[in-house]
Amino acid sequence: MKNKRGGNLRDNFAAMAWAIKKFFGYYPVLAPLAMACILFSSIVAAVPNFFIVQKVLHGAERWMQSGDWAAARGEILPYIYMLIGVYVLSICSQTLETQLMAVMTQGFLDKMRREIFNGMQDLPIRFFDSNKTGDIMSYFTNDIDTMRQLVSQSLPSLIRSGAVVLAVFFVMLYSSVWMTLVLLLGVAAMFYVAKTVGGGSAKYFMQQQKAVAAMEGFAQESMNGQKVIKVFCHEEQSIRDFDAVNEELYRVGYKANAYASMLGPIISNIGNILYVSLALVGGVLILSGVPNLSLSGNVFDVAVLVPFLSKARQFTGNVNQLSQQINSIVMAGAGAQRILSLVNEKPEEDEGYVTLVNVKENPDGTLTETTEHTGKWAWRHPHQADGSVTYTPLRGDVRLTNVDFAYVEGKDVLHDVSVYAEPGQKVAFVGATGAGKTTITNLINRFYDIADGKIRYDGININKIKKDDLRRSLGLVLQDTNLFTGTVMDNIRYGRLDASDADCRRAARLAGADDFIRRLPEGYDTMLLNNGANLSQGQRQLIAIARAAVADPPVMILDEATSSIDTRTEAIVQRGMDELMKGRTVFVIAHRLSTVMNSDVIMVLDHGRIIERGSHEALIAAKGTYYQLYTGAFELE
């Protein structure tokens, strides 16, 4: 069954069932124990007092007739003591249940967040490129909170009210079949209303979850771009755009809660009408002397009618409670449906089996794998054919041969691209924005897989290399710097977690960052927050370069690494980077041609094709596109 906007209610409830299954999977002992406590306390509230009160009433009636309390006491007091004991057990059961639910609810959210976050680490870059950050954050906040409501409120209420409804129904059926049939007519009306009104609210609650995610995504995007908004005086347009997103959230939220608010009063008033109807029908049955049809065999009189009406009130009250849970259940299902869609996202595939290992060189020149940190690395290549293992020294030889690639099928970004980077070479890519420069480095990292051609690393097809090991051998400095909450030292050490403080300082000096870091209030222990907002863009970039330096990889990828650094600072960084690049294969992407002039090979890209290649001098002599760029402007537009 689909709503008007395509939301599938069946998927919604399937997602809710998945969440409940997860809950019981996390707590296979405690969860059933808590549910048993709920059932026990619910049944105690519904069944024992009905029969015990009847026994007490009959005993009291005989006492009133005989006037002999001594004789009646032996019949009345045991049932009163039994009722007190049952209620004491019920209190203990409820106390245990509330404590268990408090522990399990928070534990469930903790485990779900961990599972979601851990799963996200395995998702391909494509997922993060195609989803807003705020929308992704909504999984951890709004959507996960709906699941908290499900396990802590809706599920216990469903079990509690459902148990009471069933227990009371059988008690009433035991007392009088005629009266129970009248009750069922009212219950049918209640469920019809619950289905009609609740179905409407369910549709809009699912839309509300999506609207909340859209609103959070827009708000997050606006906060990150606040400087741009102010510089271009875009405040009024941003307000209008936000109003449009917020208006949609208001619209679906209003309709969802309008339906939900109607449901309770309607069900409650149907229950009141049903109560009056039962009283009238019961009075007519007593006055007309209609034989009572019941399992108890009791004559239908006031002693049966009064407890029956009490149970009817309890029955309709719990039916109302059940109907009230429909909305929170559907909301939880909508949140669970979004989380389930995230959990079901296809993780990044990694069919590689070649790994990067520490090795030591034997006197005869062969390599042996070792657990010691020798500073020498090799590719461990197991051969399935004969079970042998070979070790290929990590040199940094990267070759792309006739590579084609498209982010979207049918719209090629790279066409027949071939790049040969020998160990120690510096290869530069230049070209207009969108020419495909960054795409090439994304393919070397296997953030995306090629459509055709081959990429080999030290002679090994990179599809055979495990992605973690491949990326461990590559250093990457991006134009957009990401610093994490922590100290400056922590952010540099991010490049290699086992690096010592001395290693981090050495890397900072190499990158030209040591001087400004020591002038910070607490030096290397200065805390960075909000992506290093208390640093200049150039300072953040220097820390990112130091982070790559401490990793000490054989291959470096510098994607506009000095674009945010002024000319004076660039000269300092360039000296450090020249030291860093010695003996390494380096891929450089730059708009400023001054940063690529000393490259061994410069490749000019245009619309995904390499149209020129050669050294700076050779390309100038050829007087082609590179010559025009160099003589026309030092920066590509």
Image (cartoon, rainbow, N blue to C red):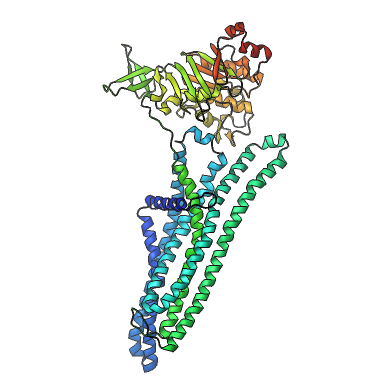
Residue 367 shown left or right of residue 606 in the figure? left
Residue 57 position, x and y percent, is 39, 84
Residue sitting nearer the eye, 350 or 52: 350
Residue sitting nearer the eye, 562 or 91: 562
Tally of marks: 0
Residue 573 shown left or right of residue 16 in the figure? right
Residue 279 position, x and y percent, is 48, 81
On screen, 563 above or below 92? above
Residue sitting nearer the eye, 1 or 525: 1
Question: Which quadrant of the figure has residue 178?
Answer: bottom left
On screen, 462 above or below 133? above
Residue sitting nearer the eye, 503 or 113: 113
Residue 211 shown left or right of residue 96 in the figure? right
On screen, 492 above or below 320? above
Where the C terminus falls, by quadrant? top right
Residue 527 position, x and y percent, is 58, 35
Q: Residue extending furthest top?
A: 621
Q: Residue extending furthest left?
A: 386
Any part of residue 331 in sight = yes
Question: Which quadrant of the figure has residue 428?
Answer: top right
Any part of residue 87 in sight = no
On screen, 99 above or below 275? above
Residue 101 position, x and y percent, is 43, 57
